[in-house]
Amino acid sequence: MGAGPNGLTAAALLAREGWEVDVFERAPVPGGACASAPVLGEGTVVDLGAAGHPFGVASPVFRELGLTDHGLAWLHPAVPMGHPLPDGPAALLHRDLEATAAGLGVDARAWRAVHGALVAHVDEILAGALGPVLRPPPHPVAMARLGLRAPWPADLLGRAMFRTAAARALFTGSAAHAILPSSRPLTAAFGALFGALGMSSGWPVARGGSGAIVDALVAVLRAHGGRLHLGHEVTDLRALPAADAVVLDLTPRQVLRVAGTGLPPRYAAALRRWRPGPSVSKVDFLLDGPIPWRDARLAGAGTVHLGGTAAEIRRAEDDVAAGRMPARPFVMLCQQQAADPSRATGPARGHTVVWSYAHVPHGHPGDVRPLIEAEVERHAPGFRDRIGAAVAMRPADLEAWNPNLVGGDIAGGSLAGARALLRPTASPRPHRAGRTGLYLASASTPPGAGVHGMGGAWAVRTLLADRRR
């Protein structure tokens, strides 16, 4: 149930193993929050959810399934990520450790110290990080390198290691992908890992839109005889055809709704303790030209973190965690056209598609478009004058589009405290939904959010291990 990247990955793996597979999806198109559409007008390609893909290009299961043999192409911008600052030039994350360090002046040595070992062993670290925590790590020495950085708050590590505003902001912006205050434990792990990915395999986009990743997964599924049923909402598991196993690409809240009394009481009680995290509010823009960045180098950046200094980002994320809307929220902005010109063609040729979202309190109902525009304008004077069209999606709109985005939460649940590691329950087999034959494969399971398919891969590993036993 559910044709998001995790559900489709699980289905494709099972079909390849010779299983008879049916996928049921409530929406008229597959992909969940990994989809693209011309919502800004004819000739535009807008990523409706996920945009940049540092985990997608590095995903072990995507490589195993051979998605690039089924039409998927990863395109890399000249600069994976940029972070403009209120005073002085922007900080840039290059697809190279030495180039990034060289741009950080006196912090070059410290930047290498934080990231060097991770960049050198990124595949080994991902083999451990993209899976359940309660298991022996496949590469213990490599995971220890991440573990030395993981427990710390990003704010503390940034202030201890870096002397310049540029290095601290570059690190804290990556840590903000946790959608947690940088004063919280474990946020340094996000900063270090996202940075290491950008400096190794990169932060690419999918040619033709993020929906191309889904198209490739569907192609693998169908190549092995799997069937996809679109526009088919299942509200009760008992309505499904008889099956040897059921895999759910759902949040715990939805599992409780569809499984009803079919879950063991203790497991159901654990799922009821699941809580959504903070939200995002999304705005896509169509400009009559490129963004007029004050630092022209940002024109080549696929992803831009807008939030100012590390201290400003911390204040904004503190407000969000406390349920207050910050005056200057942290904004993620993507310029997919820096790598993929197909995002604006035909009638849209010469225009620029801009993808953005702001971190907001859970379910925040307000209009954040003016705040996003102000944050971009702060670093690109004249941005507002170039806007020809815009489409906004508030948290409620995101959930209405994709029920897995509960209240606009894109992370599959809160990452606060132990929830960052033990998702959705403290179990050595977190992808088994309380009993053999029922499995959970979504962002609410390890390794969490992102378009990488590993939640689906681990659900299948658990399923096949149960069958062998």
Image: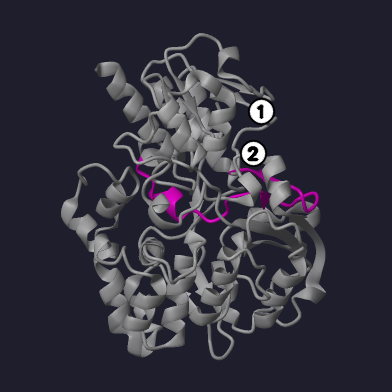
The question of residue 282 being in magenta is answered with: no
Position of residue 443 relative to residue 318, above or below, is: above
Residue segment shown in magenta = 34-60
Q: For the residue marked with disc 1, what is the amino acid? A: Arg
The question of residue 51 being in magenta is answered with: yes
- Which residue is label 2 attached to? 403
**Residue 85 x, y percent position in the rendering:** 55, 83
| Residue 340 in view in this figure | yes
Q: Residue at x 30, y 21 (%)?
A: 466
Residue 198, numbered circle = none
Q: Secondary structure at mark 1?
A: loop
**Residue 109 x, y percent position in the rendering:** 28, 83
Position of residue 333 relative to residue 213, above or below, is: below
Q: Is residue 41 left or right of residue 461?
A: right
- Which residue is label 1 attached to? 26
Q: Nearer the viewer, residue 266 or 400?
A: 266
Main SS, magenta residues: loop
Q: Residue at x 16, y 56 (%)?
A: 141
Single out the mark in the foreground, 1 or 2: 2
**Residue 403 x, y percent position in the rendering:** 64, 39
Q: Is residue 309 left or right of residue 137?
A: right
